Image (cartoon, coloured by chain):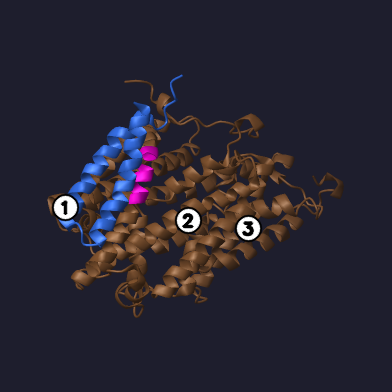
Amino acid sequence: MRRLAQLISWGALLAILLLAALFFADQLTLPAMQRWLLGVAVLWFISTPVWMGRRRNG
Amino acid sequence: MADHEHHEPVDEYERTPVPPAAQLGLKSYVGQFAGEHVAGTELMIGPLFLAAGVSAFDLLVGLLVGNLLAVLSWTLFTAPIATRVRLTLYFQLEKICGRKLVTLYNAANGVMFTFLAGAMITVSATALGVWFQFPMPGLGDLLPTGVGWVVAVLATGVLFTLVAAYGYRSVARFANLAAPWMVLMFVAFGIVGLRQLGLTSPGDFWNVAQTVIWKGGAPMAGQVKFTFWHVLFFAWFCNMAWHIGMADLSLFRYARHAWYGLASAAGMFVGHYMAWVAASILYAVQLHQDPANTAVLPGPLAYRACGLAGLLCVVAAGWTTANPTLYRAGLAFQSLVPGSSRFRVTIITGLVATVTAVFPLVTMKLLDFVALWGMILMPMGPVIFVDYWLFGRWGLRRNYAEATGGGINWAAGLTWLLTMAACSWLVLKGGVQIYFVSLPGWFVAALLYVGLSKLLQRRAPAEAAT
């Protein structure tokens, strides 16, 4: 669970850069990018508390 | 309700050196600097550079050199003393200056922290303006612009204050959680802003930077023209109270080695380079789309680029940095009234900060305010520096107040007052702008402290020197 949450968090950070890059390359419209960015923010704030600042089990 | 003392962060080793077992590694410092320096106020500072008519070379190279000097100041001034004495700034000052002078220093620090917290509340309140569409202050506004603005600031400020008083630790945890996301959001602000300004290839960046973003020329009405030297000195001195002023003795007393001061590069080049440049680009987009709209409002700027996620970033950046700022202001004021409740002091401080936030004066003049803060608190830095490195060699007593048991070391007190007077004279009558005055001010303070200490200690036997 912890590992999965970490993967989602790092994926969310990468997605921010990817979405900005796609908009820069005209592969994504501004409203679409903004919607995705909001989704990515939600994902980050749900997945990161699962592992950040918590001790590993075992 | 649970005991509010339970929510206070742990303050350890307040009057004893940090032991080896409690020392921290480099990673802790890199994380702390990177997180702390991506604050709500970065969203104001970047645009204000643009309003000051800065050119591309002056901004990008001035920030590079200025931030490098800031990193070197932490590494060569603050960390070497911190890792040798391993005491808090306040205890170190108390040993040198005496308790009464430290109390005065705390009061000055508390006032500045309160205004800064007010600026952070203002930044967050601009996000509400996007949602509720009330008139917000323009670049030249010093007074509130209407009932909507006042209500939004009061609501934001009261909320921040209550959270700082009740749940410091929760917000501190949220700040750690939000920091990596905020950093990446600032990167996104920059990339999206560049595209909105018409950049289609990274190779064209320099051309767009010079001709569209940082065109140079005259500043906007009411702003000071910024050159390379203004940018360099601003970047170097905006955290002057912390490095040359030695406030970060408290932070670096936990560092295993003095060279951990280099970790400040994470804060300077992420927060004070990338974030300022990105925020500046957002403002350029606004001016590009509507040259008449000169208002510096982080909420609308971020919303235009990144939508609701951008607004969320503005609120998070303001909130997570207002929280420790209110806490620090509360601690500073609490020291004035020993035994007072930290909870009550934080509430009062927060409400005062909220009232100051209603008036956009500090926020719109943030560059000047930050320079003023450095100037006011800087003189204690050379006092500590000279006291630690030179006094023993020159036969003068180190830690004079501790050695004599006095409540105030007049050499340090007069150094502080006379340095501020000299700097103020240079700014008001001598034609030196406030952004530069702290450099000569450092030498004035160092010379004054040596001279006044010689006068004060002339009756003390040389063998008493420690």
- The residue wearing badge 1 is A32
- Marks 2 and 3 share the same chain: yes
Q: Amino acid at mark 2?
A: Met
- The residue wearing badge 2 is B268
Label at residue B179: none
Q: Which stretch appears magenta? A: B175-184
Q: Residues within 10 Å of mark 3 (few under 14, many from 20)?
A: many
Q: Amino acid at mark 3?
A: Thr
Q: Chain of mark 3?
A: B
Q: Chain of mark 1?
A: A
- The residue wearing badge 3 is B415
Q: Is residue B312 above or below residue B378?
A: above
Q: Position of residue B100 (x, y in %)?
A: 58, 43
Task: Provide the letter of the chain coloured blue.
Answer: A
The residue sitting at 34% across, 68% down in the picture is B202
Answer yes or no: is residue B407 visible. no
Horizontal relation, residue B281 to residue B29: left or right: left
Q: Position of residue B395 (x, y in %)?
A: 82, 52
* Main SS category, magenta section: helix
- The residues tagged by marks 2 and 3 sit, at their Cα atoms, a distance apart of 30 Å
Q: Nearer the viewer, mark 1 or mark 3?
A: 1
